[in-house]
Structures are given as structure tokens and as C-alpha cells.
Image (cartoon, rainbow, N blue to C red):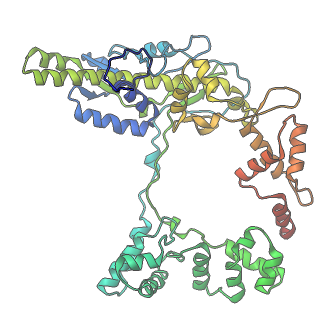
């Protein structure tokens, strides 16, 4: 068969991801903090973008503003927002749009049926979580201060500084001494000698390489490290299993003496480094607020304080366009203008999409907000996606790393999605989260002599109409960090 070039026409369909669509998808899955950083980059690179201050309406400037919806709400009486999916961005809000105009556009006021009292919620937005975080001396700074008072050679001081850099926030030395010795070109004994000196630093227990060594350092400092206590430290895994019979043999003490040593261990600090400030933890800011309404329903509001306000300065663009200039300048300004407009629309669409998804979650999980976790309904992405006429992938992106502040606490949006546990008799299915809560309550009610096995838990849950397998109960119990019934019986036995 001869090979020869030829032309052939073929018709087909394919999905093309335009740069604008890729940006819209990227913005949708960013957290508010990441979004603010992204917008800052755009403000630096695009001369037509300006940061909004909230005074544009009063000044009457020729700008377009996005994300200025401080009291956006959704209601059962009003139709849902016609925001569309992420691939069909809605119009940008202009400078004359007021908060009430925006609220009507997105949906008005929520009032789903709800009976029961919830906690009060203050949605003023004046609270600044970071303002309550006091600057503290870090553990690293504290260790370096003590190192300055230690008489060491220049080389040993450099090794010691390197060791301090490998101490984590809990105070543990998270590095192999042989690796440090090889990297620095010194002997392992020299590094070990320095570690021994550094272990005399405050807080007592720092530079330990494991929990046993950390506790041993504290006991040695207090003069309470005898042979029996060392044997106990060498067998902490038996203590975790509450196997006191083996521990009494290994430590060669009676039960009373063993319990005294266990009590002493409990008084120690397993993470001594936490007594000092470390890296400041990132403050989780809610993306959505849920609060009670006077009518007994729920109001869903975007947290406008964390949403960037971006303005497109059309007046400046028109002035530059009127001046003419070379083709390169015109092309650059035209591209900046298009990118600025698209960013505003993308931010607007992102806010509306988050609001639609959050509103539907509140509608689906109304029982949770009214009565608590026992009334959590099984929910999946498909249910929400179909209700708001969006794709499942869009809902998945919206619920990732987005948080909802409610009268019952702060929850990630993904928290409200869970597997479905069937009901006996064909009734309404149960949420996996609600079933885990029921298992925890049943175990918390245990007293000595009435510890429930996994089979017993299955029986009790079936009495409540929950059709669940034993392996599922065991999986949920382990996920809750609850030991087996054998270990729980040991706890009750030795506690008495």
C-alpha cells in the first residue's frame, strides 16, 4: 500500500477552554485570601484597574465596581438568582447599583420554614480576628537567646544554630543526627554532645527526639526518673492500650505505684514548645454568614469585608484612546481594558455562584440549623447542582476551602455533604455525619459493666431505624478516635 499525503474533512465537537474561562474557574476555587492576593497582582499589572473604597456612588465616578454586596440575601418568596453557570458570567455591577438593587438581583430575603430557636448572630462585620492575636516570642527566638549565653566554640555554635532550626513548634528535634553530622561534615558524637547540652534549655523537654525522651527529660529535671518510670516510658504503647497488667510486670510495681507514676506522666507537657509563640496560624475568614431572621427563617449573606472591590476606570481609558498614539499602545490599552472588564465580571459571577450554592445548602440542611446534627440530611453534589442548575464540578469548586459562619459555629461548605445511610422500612435516609454523632452519644453514655461492642451498637442503631453494617460502625468509631470495646473495658476496670 502506497503512502501519499491527502486532505480530508472531518466534523466533530470538542470543548475549548478559553483563557477567560480558565480564569473564571481559577477564581471560583480560590479562597477569599488567595483571591485578594490574585487581585493585588492584577492591580499592579493593569493600569485601568483601581481598588474600590465604597465611596464611588457618592462621587459619581465613571467606574464599574464588583463585589460590593454587603447584605446580599436569598428568599423563598423571591425567585432564585439567574446567575447561570461559571461558563456564562453575568453582567458586572455598575457604579449606580445600590446594595438593595444587588439584593433584589440575587434574590431578596430568605425565609424557609424553621421552628426552633438558634443562637444569636451579630453580622455587623466589625470583628477582626487577627486583632486578638498578641505577638509572642517564638520558641526559636527563645532558644537562640539561651544559646547566646552558652559557652561554645564558633563551630559548635554554628552546629547548635543548625539544630535549633530543626526544632518544630512542639519542641521536638525533627532530624536524624547522622544526617546532620554528614551534612555539616562533623562526627555524630559531636552533634549528640551538643544535643545533650541543648536539652538543658527551657522549656524542659525541648530537643527531644520522641515523646518518651521528652517526658524523661522533664522527669530527670524533677528528680523523678527511676527504673520503674523508665520502664513505663519505654512501653508507652501498652499504656495507650490500658494494658496495666503487663505494665505492672515490666515496671515491677503494684497497681497503686503504677497509677501514681501514670498520674505523674499526665502532669507533664508532651509538647513543651507550645508554651511559646510560633508561626501565626492563618485566620479562617467566613465566606458566607448565616443568621436568624425576625420571621423565624434564615438569611444568607456574603462576607463583603473579605471580597476585593475592583474598579474599571473607563474615563482614563477613553482619555488615552482619544490621544491616539502608536498601534502598540492602542493594542496594550485595549487588552488591559478587556482583561479588566472580564475580571470584574468574573468576580461578580464568583460571588453570585457562592451565594447560590450556600443558599441551597442552607435550604437542604434546614433541619441541622434548626435542631442540630441529628437532623443532618444526606446530601451530595449532584442534588445541589441540579437544584441550582449548575454542573457538579462547579459546585465542587465552590465548596472547597469555603467557610460558612452560622449560629452553630464555623463550618466548611463540604461539611454539609455526606454519604447516605439507608433507613429500615424504606424511610428517609440518614446522614453519615448524623450517624457518627449517634455512635458517639451511645459510647459517651457507657458506664462500667455496660460497654457496648460494635455488634451492640449496630443493634441499638437498628432500633432507631438505621440500617447499618458492623464494619461501617467500626469505621465511624475509629474515625472518631474511639478505641475498641476491649480497650474501653480496660479503662473502666483500672479507673475503678
Foreground of the two, 309 or 485: 485
| Residue shown at the point (43%, 58%) measured from the top left | 279
Residue 252 vertical position relative to residue 47 in the rendered view, above or below: below
**x then y, percent, for residue 19:** 34, 27
Q: Quadrant of residue 395?
A: top right
Q: In this view of the protein, can residue 68 be seen by the observer?
A: no
Quadrant position of the C terminus in the picture: bottom right
**x then y, percent, for residue 325:** 7, 20
Q: In which quarter of the image is residue 323?
A: top left
Quadrant position of the N terminus in the picture: top left
Residue 427 vertical position relative to residue 413 in the rendered view, above or below: above
- Name the residue furthest front: 1
In this rendering, would 302 be left or right of 245?
A: left
**x then y, percent, for residue 186:** 37, 84
Q: In which quarter of the image is residue 143?
A: bottom left
| Residue shown at the point (24%, 16%) measured from the top left | 62
| Residue shown at the point (61%, 24%) measured from the top left | 384
**x then y, percent, for residue 63:** 27, 18
| Residue shown at the point (46%, 22%) measured from the top left | 86
In this rendering, would 230 be left or right of 94?
A: right
In this rendering, would 185 be left or right of 336?
A: right
Count of numbered labels shown in the rendering: 0
Residue 243 vertical position relative to residue 476 in the rendered view, above or below: below
In this rendering, would 44 be left or right of 445?
A: left
Q: In this view of the protein, can residue 487 be seen by the observer?
A: yes
Amino acid at each position: 500500500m502506497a503512502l501519499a499525503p491527502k486532505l480530508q474533512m472531518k466534523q466533530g465537537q470538542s470543548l475549548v477552554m478559553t483563557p477567560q474561562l480558565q480564569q473564571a474557574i481559577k477564581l471560583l476555587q480560590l479562597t477569599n485570601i488567595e483571591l485578594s492576593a490574585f487581585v493585588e497582582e492584577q492591580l499592579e499589572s493593569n493600569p485601568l484597574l483601581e481598588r474600590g473604597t465604597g465611596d464611588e456612588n457618592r462621587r459619581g465616578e465613571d467606574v464599574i465596581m464588583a463585589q460590593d454586596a454587603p447584605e446580599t440575601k436569598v428568599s423563598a418568596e423571591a425567585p432564585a438568582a439567574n446567575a447561570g453557570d461559571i461558563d456564562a458570567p453575568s453582567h458586572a455591577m455598575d457604579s449606580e447599583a445600590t446594595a438593595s438593587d444587588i439584593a433584589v438581583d440575587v434574590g431578596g430575603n430568605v425565609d424557609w420554614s424553621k421552628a426552633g430557636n438558634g443562637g444569636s448572630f451579630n453580622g455587623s462585620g466589625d470583628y477582626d480576628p487577627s486583632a486578638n492575636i498578641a505577638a509572642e516570642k517564638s520558641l526559636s527566638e527563645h532558644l537562640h537567646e539561651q544559646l547566646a549565653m552558652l559557652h561554645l566554640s564558633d563551630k559548635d555554635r554554628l552546629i547548635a544554630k543548625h539544630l535549633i532550626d530543626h526544632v518544630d513548634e512542639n519542641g521536638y528535634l525533627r532530624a536524624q543526627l547522622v544526617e546532620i553530622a554528614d551534612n555539616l561534615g562533623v562526627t555524630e558524637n559531636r552533634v549528640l554532645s551538643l544535643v545533650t547540652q541543648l536539652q538543658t534549655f527551657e522549656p524542659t523537654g525541648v530537643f527531644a527526639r520522641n515523646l518518651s525522651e521528652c517526658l524523661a527529660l522533664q522527669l530527670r529535671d524533677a528528680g523523678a526518673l527511676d527504673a520503674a518510670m523508665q520502664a513505663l516510658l519505654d512501653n508507652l504503647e501498652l499504656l495507650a492500650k490500658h494494658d496495666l497488667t503487663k505494665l505492672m510486670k515490666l515496671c515491677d510495681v503494684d497497681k497503686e505505684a503504677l497509677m501514681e507514676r501514670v498520674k505523674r506522666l499526665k502532669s507533664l507537657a508532651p509538647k513543651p514548645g507550645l508554651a511559646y509563640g510560633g508561626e501565626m496560624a492563618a485566620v479562617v475568614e467566613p465566606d458566607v454568614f448565616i443568621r436568624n431572621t425576625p420571621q423565624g427563617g434564615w438569611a444568607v449573606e456574603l462576607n463583603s469585608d473579605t471580597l476585593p472591590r475592583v474598579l474599571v476606570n473607563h474615563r482614563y481609558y477613553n482619555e488615552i484612546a482619544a490621544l491616539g498614539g502608536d498601534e502598540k499602545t492602542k493594542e496594550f490599552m485595549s487588552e488591559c481594558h478587556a482583561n479588566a472588564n472580564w475580571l470584574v465580571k468574573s468576580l461578580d459571577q464568583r460571588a453570585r455562584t457562592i451565594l447560590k450554592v450556600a443558599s441551597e445548602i442552607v435550604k437542604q440542611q434546614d433541619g441541622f440549623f434548626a435542631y442540630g446534627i441529628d437532623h443532618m440530611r444526606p446530601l451530595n453534589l449532584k442534588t445541589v447542582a441540579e437544584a441550582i442548575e449548575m454542573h457538579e464540578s462547579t459546585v465542587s469548586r465552590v465548596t472547597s476551602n469555603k467557610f460558612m459562619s452560622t449560629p452553630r459555629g464555623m463550618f466548611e461548605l463540604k461539611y454539609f455533604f455526606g454519604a447516605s445511610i439507608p433507613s429500615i422500612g424504606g424511610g428517609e435516609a440518614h446522614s453519615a455525619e448524623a450517624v457518627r454523632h449517634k455512635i458517639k452519644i451511645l459510647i459517651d453514655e457507657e458506664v462500667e459493666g455496660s460497654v457496648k461492642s460494635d455488634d451492640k451498637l449496630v443493634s441499638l442503631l437498628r432500633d432507631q431505624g438505621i440500617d447499618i453494617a458492623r464494619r461501617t460502625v467500626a469505621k465511624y468509631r475509629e474515625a472518631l478516635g474511639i478505641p475498641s470495646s476491649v480497650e474501653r473495658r480496660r479503662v473502666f476496670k483500672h479507673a475503678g
